[in-house]
Image: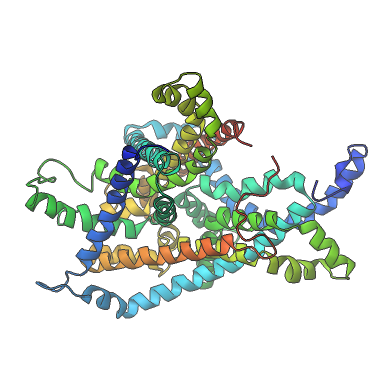
Amino acid sequence: MRRVPVLSWLAALLAAAYFLVPLYATFKFSLQMKRGELSFESYRSVLSSDLFLQVLGFSAMASLAAIVLGILLVVPTAYWVRLKLPGLRPLTEFLSLMPLIIPPVVLVFGYVRIYGTGSVLPLTMTEAGTNLLLVIGYTVLSLPYMYRAVDNGMAAIDIATLTEAAESLGASRLRTVATVIFPNIRSAIVSGAFLTFSISLGEFVVTSLLSRPGFGPYMVQIGQDYAYQPAAIAIMAFAFTWICMVLMELFATARPGQGPFRRRKGKKG
Amino acid sequence: MAHLPLDGGTARPRRRLARTGWRWLGLLPFLAFAALFLILPIGYLVRGAFQTPDGRWSLETMAQLFSPEIRASYWLSIRLSLVSAGMGALAGLVLGWALILGGLPGWVRRGFMTFSGVASNFAGVPLAFAFIATLGRLGLATLVLRDVFGLNIYAAGFSLFSFWGLALTYLYFQLPLMVLMLTPALEGMRPEWREAAESLGASPRQYLGRVALPLLAPSVLGCFLLLFANAFGTLATIYALTSANFGVVPIVLFQQIRGNVLYNPNLGYALAVGMIVIMAASNTVYFLLRRRAERWRS
């Protein structure tokens, strides 16, 4: 119909170069640890370090805890707002989006002041308290994404009918949410969970300012001490982000009980 | 009207109010969480910003934001965010247009979209590492440019750890983010509009300048503001790149929390409030622009 879109191709090629050159360069760099040959030595060096596994384990646990906390907070709330309080939707939406406006450094500044030594609720006095604060911080940072994912999932199913059906069969409210609503939006939740995981695992600011032995601060330290290992970490982090995004996308598009590829948001216009 | 047949009527506003009065209890856990871990910490900082260290209410602390050092730090942050958002918005508009309206095959578009989803989330410390390995003093691209093309970028004044190096690094997540955010607007450009313009005798340039760009302008501007806010709050990338030696506001605040570098804790609060104000302003304008942009779609 039209001629070959030269300009479009040019733009796409330039962008592809900008995106791929750093990845290629980083990968190549990461292979050069042994002089004069290409090897995976830097990867071996990173992966075999006890500290690496330790901080990764810590961050993974904290991220998982943040996911669970996020689900427990967001699912009932989004459900309740959609079902009973559509008028309060702007409020919950605003609150869930607030973390996008508040930079993490500001948020954690508030935390260390309010929940620090000498406050009413000195969470940072104990190890467990600080860990709890870290998990809460991760939950807050991922709140916008979790809320959006869950809310989109709920838009795709008919909550009102499902609830009525469950109630007419004698299910309690809690049971309705746990056994009817939850399974129906499971893929939306999982999709939000993967995003949360990818945000939290390498998080630096909150982790560092709460002095937690997480993966983010560890990476910064490696960056200061070594040359080739950081490149290996960058490649692994990119692969990890990629996997999280693919899984997220996969679960976000798969909606039980709906047409296979309905991706439009369920808003009536 | 999919749900809530009971709440539809306006005839019994009082009863509806009474119902809402109990129902909001279902939101209590969420609201309590938000109050404790969002509102309260911010409120604390805001209060501190309007007090002196000895607890007197005053505008003195906020006024210190305008001292030369702090102002320089804000100005640096704003410039870096403006430049990186501008680059991201422009490049994202061009790339997005090429992908969605430019007649490229579907696989190119899908590939970029998937990649954008990943790259827009590939920020922080690993991104810094990738760019050090690429454009650092011994980065691969730096060496190739020097040895193959005879172009020594560091001798020419470029440094990854300077303003433009940082802006170029930020582009790695700003550009894909722009593409992702602008896609709905670009998809909303109806072929009929182009056909109407063409049938009225408009040249492609006229269509672009008089129809397409004005229609896209609110979206583009809105996304630009979001990119601005995104860059303004970025800390980890810059920290890992410059070892905290680049005095943008988040870095100054970070150092302030680590150890009292400003010699006045309340100035830290003021710094934080200043950041919130800038972030909130750009997000609010973004929101207004988006509402305006949505008038054309639906």
Q: Position of residue A59 (x, y in %)?
A: 45, 70
Indicate left or right for B292 with B164 as reference: right
Indicate left or right for A148 with B29 as reference: left
- In this rendering, does residue A113 appear at all? yes
Choose between B297 and B18: the one closer to the eye.
B297
Q: Quadrant of the N terminus of chain A?
A: top left
Q: Pick out the residue farthest to the top.
A: B201
- In this rendering, does residue A117 appear at all? no
Q: Residue at the location (86% across, 42% down)?
A: B8
Q: Is residue A21 positioned above or below B8 on the image?
A: below
Quadrant of residue B202 in the image?
top left
Choose between A16 and A221: the one closer to the eye.
A16
Q: Position of residue B128 (x, y in %)?
A: 30, 56
Choose between B147 and B246: the one closer to the eye.
B147
Quadrant of residue A238 in the image?
bottom left
Q: Is residue A100 positioned above or below A153 on the image?
A: above
Q: Position of residue A102 (x, y in %)?
A: 51, 47
Q: Quadrant of the C terminus of chain A?
A: top right
Q: Residue at the location (26% across, 49% down)?
A: B245
Q: Residue at the location (14% across, 57% down)?
A: B138
Q: Position of residue A45 (x, y in %)?
A: 25, 77
Q: Is residue A113 positioned above or below A39 on the image?
A: above
Q: Pick out the residue farthest to the front.
A: A1
Indicate left or right for B247 with A186 as reference: left
